[in-house]
Amino acid sequence: SACYTEEGEEAPTDYTTKFEVCNDDGKFYVCNEYGGCDVSKCPGWGMIFDYDAQDCVESSFCDIPADCDNPCDGIDLEGGDHPYQAHCDDDKYLQCNSVGGCRVLYCEYDLVWDDDAKACVPPDDVEELPSSMECSE
C-alpha cells in the first residue's frame, strides 16, 4: 500500500514532506511508513498550508461583503494597531492578522460594535429629538 500525491505520484514516506489536503487549505498531510496518511490542521485561525514553504502561514483572506472596505489591509499589529476592527454591519467586528486577513466575529444579542471602545456595547436606547421636533399641546 502507498500514499499518493494529488498528482497521482507515490509520495515519500519520510514524515518530512507535507502535502496539501484537497478543498481545505488549512490542513496538510504526511505519509507514514504503512502507506497511510496522517492529517494535521494548521494551528490557529487564518492559517493556510503553503506547500513551497512546507509550513502553515497566515492568510490574507478576509470574508467581508464586496462593498465593505477591509480595515485589516495595511494594519501594523506589531506597531500597536488594534487587532479588532469595525465591520460594515453594526453587530459584527473583525479580528485581523498581520497580513491583512481577518475573521468575522459577532456581538452578543442586542449589542453593537463600538470601534472607539473596541468592544460590543448596548446601542443607544432612544435618540433624543431636537426641541423643534417635540410635540406641543
Image (cartoon, rainbow, N blue to C red):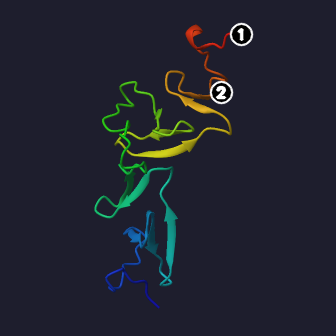
Q: Nearer the viewer, mark 1 or mark 2?
A: 1
Q: Position of residue 78 (x, y in %)?
A: 38, 29
Question: How many other residues sit within 10 Å of disc 2, few (<14), some (14-19) or many (≥20)?
Answer: some
Provide the residue designation for mark 2: 122
Farthest-out residue, bottom: 1
Relative image position of residue 115 (x, y in whole percent): 49, 26
Please tell me which residue is depicted at 62% across the width and 15% down the height of the picture: 128
Q: CA distance from mark 1 to mark 2?
A: 33 Å
Residue 81's quadrant in the figure? top left
Residue 131 vs residue 78, the one in the foreground: 131
Mark 1 packing: few (<14 Cα in 10 Å), some, or many (20+)?
few
Instruction: First in sequence, mark 1 or 2: give its number.
Output: 2
Residue 61 image position (x, y, % from top left) = 38, 51
Residue that appears at 32% across and 38% down = 73
- Which amino acid lies under the numbered mark 1 shown in the image of this protein? Glu
Q: Position of residue 136 (x, y in %)?
A: 67, 10
Q: Nearer the viewer, residue 112 or 11?
A: 112
The local secondary structure at tag 2 comes to loop
What amino acid is found at the position of numbered circle 2 in the picture? Pro
Q: Which mark is residue 137?
A: 1
The numbered mark at residue 58 is: none
